[in-house]
Image (tube, rainbow, N blue to C red):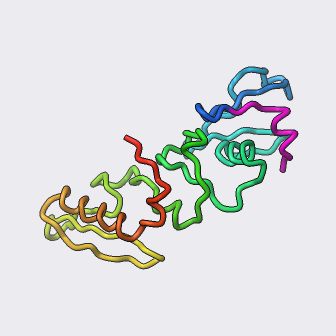
Amino acid sequence: MIDHSELTRLLDYDQNTGQFTWKVKTCRKVVPGKKAGGLNSNGYVQIKINNIFFYGHRLAWFYVHRDWPEQEIDHINGNPSDNRMCNLRSADRTQNNQNRIARVDCKSGVRGVMQRKDTKKWRAEIRVNKKLISLGCFQTLEEAAVARKIAEQTYFTHHRETKNDYA
C-alpha cells in the first residue's frame, strides 16, 4: 500500500479531468509533469508506484477522500478510463453490476435483451438480488428495451438516485 502523504508527494490529481501527473522522477521512465499510468486490457487506468500497480479510480478516491475505499468504485458513465471525481462513487458489487454497459458480444446492444432464435421475438430480462426475472417477449427490440429500462427504474431506484445522466 501507499500512504496519502507519499501519494500526494509523487502525483498530482486533477478532479476535473481525472488525470494523474508525476510530480517527481521516481525512475528513468517517469518524467515530472507527464501523465501517469496507462490503460490495461479492460480499459482501466493503472499506475505503477513502488513496483505496485494501482487502479486510477481507487487512487483518485484515496487522493481526494484520504481513505481507501471500503467498497468498489463505480464509474457512473460506464467508461472505466474516466476518473473524474464527479464520475466516481462508492458502490457495492450489486450496484456496480447494475450500472454496467452492454457487453461487446451483446447482439441487441441492450443489456438484458436478446432475440429468441425460435420465434425471432425479443426477450427482456433483469437480474435482481441474484434472481433472474423475465420481463416478457416483444415484437420489436425497441419494445423490449423500454421494458428493460422500466424494470431498471423500478428495481434499482436506490441506485438511480445517485446516478448522473450522461449522453
Residue 60, image x and y in percent? 69, 42
Query: Image check: 120 left or right of 77?
Result: left
Q: Is residue 100 above or below residue 158?
A: above
Q: Classify residue 12 by image quadrant.
A: top right
In the rendered view of the protein, which quadrant contains the C terminus? top left
Q: Nearer the viewer, residue 23 or 162?
A: 162
Work out whether residue 7 can be spotted. Answer: yes
Magenta segment, which residues?
1-13
Name the residue at 34% across, 55% down. Answer: 106
Residue 113, image x and y in percent? 29, 62
Is 7 covered by the magenta stretch?
A: yes
Q: Is residue 31 above or below residue 84?
A: above
Name the residue at 73% across, 48% down. Answer: 65
Residue 32, image x and y in percent? 78, 21
Query: Image check: 56 left or right of 11?
Result: left
Residue 132, image x and y in percent? 38, 76
Name the residue at 59% across, 40% down. Answer: 83
Q: Classify residue 142 by image quadrant.
A: bottom left
Number of numbered discs visible in the structure rendering: 0
Work out whether residue 40 can be spotted. Answer: no
Is 128 covered by the magenta stretch?
A: no
Residue lying farthest to the bottom in this orientation? 131
Q: Classify residue 30 by image quadrant.
A: top right
Residue lying farthest to the front in this orientation? 161
Name the residue at 61% across, 57% down. Answer: 90
Query: Image check: 38 left or right of 65?
Result: left
